[in-house]
Image (spheres, grey):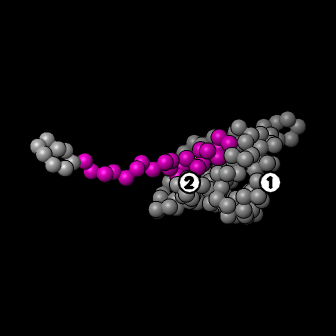
Amino acid sequence: MSGAGAVATATRPAKEAGSPDDALHAFSAALRGGDLRRATACFTREGCLITPDGTAVHGREDIRAVLAQLIASRTEVEIQRVVVRRAGEVALASGHVTMRSDGPEGTRFLQACDPMMVIHRVDGTWKLAVIAPWGSHSP
């Protein structure tokens, strides 16, 4: 820069695309919309989903089968509160959600849950690495 009146500008880092809690909101929206492909894509390739009985389901393909069951029962996740603690490319999240699913004989089942999640940024996108949607309690 030269000459009178020249103004120096500081280079700012590009604004981060998304945030860790966006992963949970994207997952909820995909389930609500019945979009199995999008719901599965919310997970890392090596992701883990913990079922209500404590079974750890590993990998997108196996998680996809569980998500298909949730979509078939018209599961909806309403996020009431989420708290995220971030450390670089990884975040720990917890919160409170209400889950609704089809029950027996045409009824709807309502369950309040306190999910635990590990969210990892992969290629600039926050994805679910581990999620215990029904909470972290042992069966």
Dot 2 corresponds to which residue? 126
The amino acid marked with disc number 2 is Trp
Name the image quarter holding residue 137: bottom right
Checking the image for residue 65, the label placed there is 1
Q: Which residues are magenta?
A: 9-30
Say left or right for 81 vs 28: left
Queried whether the magenta region covers residue 22, the answer comes back as: yes
Kindly indicate whether the residue at mark 1 contacts the one at mark 2 (C-beta within 8 angstroms): no
Secondary structure, mark 1, is helix
The amino acid marked with disc number 1 is Ala
Is residue 97 visible in the rendered image? The answer is: no
Q: How many marks?
A: 2
Label 2 vs 1, first from the N-terminus? 1
Q: Please, which residue is most extreme toward the right here?
A: 105
Checking the image for residue 130, the label placed there is none
Is residue 48 depicted above or below 33 in this figure? below
Queried whether the magenta region covers residue 85, the answer comes back as: no
